[in-house]
Image (tube, rainbow, N blue to C red):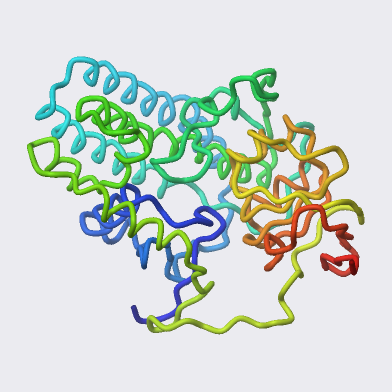
């Protein structure tokens, strides 16, 4: 691993399921120019030079890209998912093994389209009438995962009996370059989610065909799942133990030439500051699923490992007004949605998830510090 590699904590703040880790390895092997991420001990790392050039296309090109995304790329990916779901209904085990290959092909096609989209601009946030981070989220609750992992339940899976069920989409029609590019950067998450969904559907169908619990089926990488569908033993117990051991690790934020880069102690409880200063009791949640299952009390400061693009609709539904997260920077999804939703936030606030629930904290956005009241 020559050069600098960064933990992709903004998108994957937890250890990947063996199924998703195997998928990343398979795609990196088959499309090395397209998928340059690496999985190390179950955690996802990206090469530092992967960042695309900071360049915004002209408005006409951006409008064409947005039109293609809304009218062709996303509908075609949706149609492909629907067609695969139809095939899954009557598929036996050998047919399921073949459909796993087809689902991976659908994802590769989506990744090719995804890579061709204009880059997200590095400006702070576009000014629009409606938050761009909420555009069309509700329409895709059935494919948007709580975390970017094929083992993750979708927001629709988690929405029953929650405030998500009452939400409605807020469509936007931006015209300036910054807003157009920002919206494309938000909507491409729907395309990526539609690319992941076919393989998740294959896994769930395979779980039923093999009489394996849904949680356990995602212990199998795609190649192994295909072998099991053709008669091999799944050997679930050692796979489960290895995954649980990796999930307990605290991986370094950066690797250089394969070795950990030490962090700075003065970075702890410090982050990118957004919004006004607030005080309140800290409430810890490990992910969006836990957040939806147990919404924080009014006035609480939410601490969570990361805020992916999917979080915007959850924060809106639950009325969260103050948040701090371990991962992300000034141009992350977390920062964009915090600004658009009018939240108080500290983004990339290392150590915030180690502060015990109930601790009274001051989210000091003037200095970018999370200050803990001494007990």
Residue 195 horizontal/vertical position (percent): 37, 37
Question: Image quarter for residue 103?
Answer: top left
| Residue 59 is at least partly visible in this image | no
Q: Is residue 273 left or right of residue 268?
A: right
- Which of 311 and 192 lies nearest the eye of the viewer? 311
Q: Is residue 357 left or right of residue 44?
A: right
Q: Residue at x 60, y 41 (%)?
A: 288
Please give the count of numbered marks on the rendered protein. 0
Residue 114 horizontal/vertical position (percent): 42, 44
Question: Image quarter for residue 321?
Answer: top right
Position of residue 252 relative to residue 50, above or below, is below
Question: Image quarter for residue 185?
Answer: top right
Q: Is residue 130 left or right of residue 164?
A: right
Position of residue 130 relative to residue 161, above or below, is below
Assign the C terminus to one quadrant of the image. bottom right
- Which of 135 and 60 lies nearest the eye of the viewer? 135
Position of residue 130 relative to residue 28, above or below, is above
Q: Residue at x 36, y 67 (%)?
A: 40
| Residue 13 is at least partly visible in this image | yes
């Amino acid at each position: 691993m020559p050069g600098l590699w960064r933990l992709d904590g903004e998108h994957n703040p937890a250890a990947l399921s063996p199924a998703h880790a195997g998928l990343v390895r398979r795609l990196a092997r088959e499309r090395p120019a397209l998928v340059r991420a690496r999985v190390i001990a179950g955690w996802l790392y990206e090469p530092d030079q992967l960042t695309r050039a900071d360049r915004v296309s002209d408005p006409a090109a951006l409008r064409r890209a947005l039109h293609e995304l809304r009218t062709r790329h996303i509908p075609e990916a949706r149609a492909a998912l629907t067609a695969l779901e139809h095939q899954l209904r009557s598929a036996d085990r050998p047919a399921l093994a073949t459909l796993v290959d087809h689902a991976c092909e659908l994802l590769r096609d989506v990744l090719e389209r995804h890579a061709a989209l204009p880059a997200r601009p590095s400006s702070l946030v576009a000014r629009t009438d409606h938050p761009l981070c909420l555009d069309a989220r509700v329409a895709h609750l059935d494919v948007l995962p709580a975390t970017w992992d094929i083992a993750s339940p979708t927001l629709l899976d988690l929405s029953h009996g929650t405030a998500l069920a009452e939400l409605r989409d807020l469509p936007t029609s931006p015209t300036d370059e910054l807003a157009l590019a920002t919206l494309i950067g938000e909507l491409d998450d729907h395309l990526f989610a539609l690319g992941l969904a076919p393989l998740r559907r294959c896994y769930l169908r395979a779980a039923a065909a093999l009489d394996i619990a849904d949680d356990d089926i995602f212990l199998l990488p795609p190649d192994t799942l295909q072998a099991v569908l053709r008669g091999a033993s799944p050997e679930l117990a050692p796979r489960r133990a290895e995954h649980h051991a990796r999930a307990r690790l605290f991986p370094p934020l950066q690797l250089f030439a394969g070795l950990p880069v030490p962090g700075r102690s003065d970075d702890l409880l410090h982050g990118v500051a957004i919004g006004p200063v607030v005080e309140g009791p800290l409430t810890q949640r490990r992910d969006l699923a836990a957040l939806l299952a147990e919404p924080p009390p009014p006035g609480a400061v939410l601490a969570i490992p990361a805020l992916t693009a999917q979080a915007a609709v959850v924060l809106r539904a639950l009325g969260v007004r103050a948040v701090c997260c371990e991962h992300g920077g000034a141009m992350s999804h977390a920062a964009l949605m915090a600004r658009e939703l009018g939240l108080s936030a500290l983004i990339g606030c290392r150590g915030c998830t180690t502060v015990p629930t109930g601790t009274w904290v001051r989210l000091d956005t003037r200095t970018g510090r999370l200050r803990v009241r001494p007990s």
